[in-house]
Image: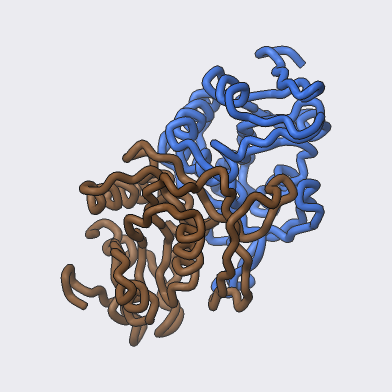
Chain colours: A blue, B brown
Amino acid sequence: MKALQEKIHEVGRVLSADVLKVDSFLNHQIDPQLMKEVGEEFANRYANEVITKVLTIESSGIAPATFLGLTIGAPVVFARKKQSLTLTDNVYTSEVYSFTKQESNKISVSRDFLTADDNVIIIDDFLANGEAVKGLVDIVNQSGAHLVGVGIVIEKGFQQGGKLLRDQGLRIESLARIKSLENGKVEFFEDGEF
Amino acid sequence: MKALQEKIHEVGRVLSADVLKVDSFLNHQIDPQLMKEVGEEFANRYANEVITKVLTIESSGIAPATFLGLTIGAPVVFARKKQSLTLTDNVYTSEVYSFTKQESNKISVSRDFLTADDNVIIIDDFLANGEAVKGLVDIVNQSGAHLVGVGIVIEKGFQQGGKLLRDQGLRIESLARIKSLENGKVEFFEDGEF
């Protein structure tokens, strides 16, 4: 997605060969207009599918997931990283290890909002090692819902998550696929290049 | 806001005289169309003000804040409840006690995204005891920005937060103000009634 790649070139900061900081428009400050375009692009890529539910995880997945939900007319559910007191035992849970935060989180989704009748798309801001998506896939499997595919805003294509998930037969659509962050420079895969 | 009050009557669940569960459209599952209307209603209420930044807190404030930001053309910043490793020391912090989760959280906002030049509106999903808004106001004050006002999706008008904040001279716009949850029934304040 051109507008997204341009934004990353313009304001993304390469902190190391592994870390790209995009907190000026994606995961701390949000650019609403760009997130709207991101949501619409996910809708385009999955235009041939019937989707009844958009599943994401708090917090940075919420904005793009919500614009996708608005575009296709489907509700959005965000998995919680901590159980609140008003969420009762009626939940699916899974474990997600975060390399960024160096901790394991239990994530949960209420059984009220994901059932075997659903056709689900999973949305997240980043795909690196694939831990968050794996946890969300686990929850979709527990619910018996059909998983249509995954939409990622930025994939770090030089890490293993995308390959692992695609090898399982999952459809993954990443709007920006980073080939390398070497030498402080962001390089993208071209469309179709792997 | 009529559509919001109707939605609360339709799907909100009164768990006790203090607790209203609205996780089917606001804080676990999100109704994107309603959140769009909520964001637009905040924009209407503050149409006479110049706003350069929408400030909220993860996670349930993000959807309404993002639609407000889209409507008025302003970026959105969400305060984080935990510091991530890619957020460096360059942050404003404050303490927020959550009665729902029975724990105190340090919240933080990068100094890059809130400065003395900003005109800020604070958005949150719920106003009860006012702890989250107080923490966000503290952060706005630290930054030297001008605080235009606060927008709340659902105010529990029978709890003290709204009164405390209004007594400090803050403008608070709540789209649904609950008068009582007694006897399992949601009663709203009429517009202008306090």
Q: Quadrant of the C terminus of chain B?
A: bottom left
In this rendered view, identify the residue nearer to me: A21 or A180. A21
Q: Is residue A73 left or right of residue A46?
A: left
User: Residue B179, percent across and down?
Assistant: 28, 79
Residue B159 appears in the rendering: yes
Q: Is residue A73 left or right of residue B72?
A: right
User: Residue B167, percent across and down?
Assistant: 31, 76
B41 above or below A70?
Answer: below
User: Which residue is pictured at 29% across the width and 46% down the height?
Assistant: B40
Residue B29 appears in the rendering: no
User: Which residue is pictured at 81% across the width and 22% down the height?
Assistant: A182
B6 above or below B96?
Answer: above
User: Which residue is pictured at 36% across the width and 73% down the height?
Assistant: B165
The answer to which image quadrant residue A95 occupies is bottom right
Q: Quadrant of the N terminus of chain B?
A: bottom left
User: Residue B158, percent across and down?
Assistant: 33, 82
User: Residue A47, percent across and down?
Assistant: 49, 25
